[in-house]
C-alpha cells in the first residue's frame, strides 16, 4: 500500500486497530477463518473452502456470528 500524505506517520497510524487473532475452523463442512468470541460463539472473517453454494448462503457471510459446541 502506498500512502501519500504530508502528515507524520505517527498521526496516520495512531488510530490503527490491532488485529485480533483468528483461527481456521471447519463448521458444517465449510472451512472458514473465524474470530473467537465469548460463550462458544465465533464471528466469520472469511470462507476458505467449501461447496460453491455456501458462498451464496447468507448464514456464512463474513461478520455473521455462529454458535458452536467444541469437540473434546
Image (spheres, helix red, strand yellow):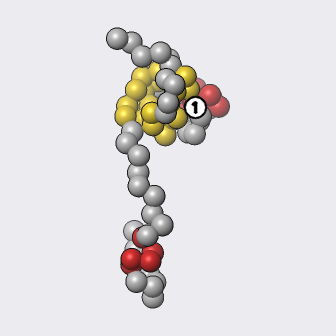
Name the one closer to the observer, 67 or 46. Answer: 67
Residue 39 placed where, x, y %? 51, 25
Residue 11 placed where, x, y %? 44, 77
Residue 4 appears in the figure: yes
Say which residue appears at 59% left-offset and 34% top-offset.
Answer: 64
In the image, residue 10 sits, relative to residue 20, either above or below, namely: below
Quadrant where the N terminus sits is: bottom left
Residue 61 placed where, x, y %? 59, 35
Say which residue appears at 41% left-offset and 55% top-offset.
Answer: 18
Residue 28 placed where, x, y %? 50, 17
Say which residue appears at 39% left-offset and 77% top-offset.
Answer: 10
Quadrant in the rendering for residue 31: top left
Furthest residue in direction front, as rendered: 39
Name the one closer to the observer, 14 or 3. Answer: 14
Q: Quickly name the residue at label 1.
A: 65
Quadrant where the C terminus sits is: top left
| Helix, strand or loop status at disc 1 | strand
Say which residue appears at 45% left-offset and 37% top-offset.
Answer: 35
Furthest residue in direction top, as rendered: 72
Furthest residue in direction left, as rendered: 72
As drawn, is 36 to the left or to the right of 64?
left
Residue 47 appears in the figure: no
Amino acid at each position: 500500500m502506498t500512502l501519500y500524505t504530508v502528515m507524520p506517520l505517527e498521526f496516520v497510524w495512531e488510530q490503527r486497530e490491532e488485529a485480533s487473532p483468528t483461527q481456521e475452523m471447519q463448521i458444517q463442512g465449510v472451512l472458514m477463518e473465524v474470530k473467537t468470541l465469548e460463550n462458544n460463539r465465533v464471528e466469520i472473517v472469511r470462507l476458505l473452502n467449501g461447496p460453491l453454494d455456501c458462498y451464496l448462503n447468507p448464514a456464512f457471510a463474513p461478520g455473521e456470528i455462529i454458535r458452536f459446541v467444541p469437540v473434546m
